Image (cartoon, rainbow, N blue to C red):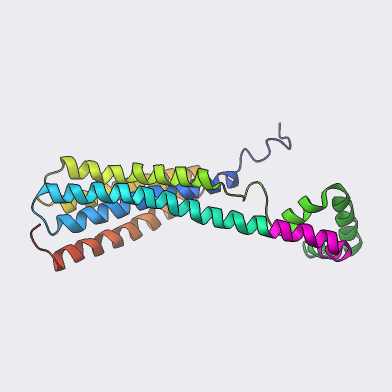
């Protein structure tokens, strides 16, 4: 039975914030660490420098990803809070203008002028600030991001994604290691694309195609740099 409490359960929009951070982190971990390892492998005949670069990239990348996600989402949250405070002042200083704006919003969404005004008046009486936050500013519980959650998910996902090419660097033969890295990375990206698409309820084929194409471009360019500037390290 569908109720107001569970009506979003069959939908995927409430997963968008953490899923975006997870996919971004895992994708960045797989591609950036693989690309780094491929670039060094293309210029090296020994495992040690490749492994060192991979581990260093994994640690630095995970911390950078978590910090960047936290700062980015925190900035978004600060903007939302500032807009909410501004809305409080406007509701206090010019309530009639705010009511008119709210009615116009509903009218543009398809309500008749009288109906839009009536809805705006009733919602304002019930929860003026909440109504304006939701319908004028477009901020709601689903769209609001959590900085700590985004940072933890992104950092953990980067670590998990970057650990995959690290395993290849540890156990695959050094000779032609870049080809092993490329093949394993493509498989990992296909799995990531499929899982993210399934979790988000989107097209699996489109997700896989997008992630594989851009991953391939990144790795090919990294290998090219390694070959061009290749010296034995």
| Residue 53, x across and y down, in percent | 21, 51
Front one among 26 and 189? 26
> Residue at 68% across / 50% down in the picture?
140
Q: Is residue 110 visible?
A: no
| Residue 227, x across and y down, in percent | 14, 64
| 50 sits left or right of 145 in the view | left
| 160 sits left or right of 133 in the view | left
> Residue at 47% across / 52% down in the picture?
69
| Residue 184, x across and y down, in percent | 25, 46
Q: Which region of the structure is painted magenta?
A: 83-103
Give the main secondary structure of the magenta stretch: helix
| Residue 144, x across and y down, in percent | 61, 50
Is 101 magenta? The answer is yes
Front one among 113 and 65? 65
Judge whether 119 appears above or below 153 on screen. Answer: below
- Which residue lies most toward the bottom here? 228
Quadrant for the C terminus, please. Answer: bottom left
Q: Is residue 72 visible?
A: yes
Judge whether 210 appears above or below 126 on screen. Answer: below
Q: Quadrant of residue 161?
A: top left
Count the numbered circles shown. 0
Is 132 magenta? The answer is no
């Amino acid at each position: 039975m569908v109720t107001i409490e569970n009506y979003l359960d069959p939908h995927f929009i409430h997963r968008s914030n953490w899923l975006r951070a997870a996919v971004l982190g895992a994708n960045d971990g797989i591609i950036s660490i693989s690309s780094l390892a491929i670039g060094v492998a293309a210029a090296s005949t020994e495992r040690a420098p490749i492994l060192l670069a991979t581990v260093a990239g994994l640690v630095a990348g995970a911390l950078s990803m978590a910090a960047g996600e936290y700062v980015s989402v925190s900035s978004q949250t600060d903007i939302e809070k500032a807009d909410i405070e501004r809305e409080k002042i406007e509701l206090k200083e010019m309530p009639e203008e705010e009511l008119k704006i709210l009615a116009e919003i509903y009218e543009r969404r398809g309500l008749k002028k009288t109906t839009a005004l009536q809805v705006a008046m009733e919602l304002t009486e019930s929860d003026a600030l909440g109504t304006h936050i939701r319908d004028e500013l477009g901020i709601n519980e689903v769209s609001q991001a959590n900085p700590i959650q985004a940072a933890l998910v992104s950092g953990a996902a980067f670590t998990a994604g970057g650990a995959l090419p690290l395993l290849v660097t540890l156990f695959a033969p050094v000779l032609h290691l870049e080809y092993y890295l490329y093949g394993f990375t493509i498989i990992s990206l296909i799995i990531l694309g499929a899982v993210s698409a399934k979790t988000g309820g989107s097209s699996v084929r489109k997700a896989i195609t997008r992630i594989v194409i851009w991953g391939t471009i990144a790795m090919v360019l990294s290998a090219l740099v390694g070959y061009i500037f290749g010296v034995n390290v």
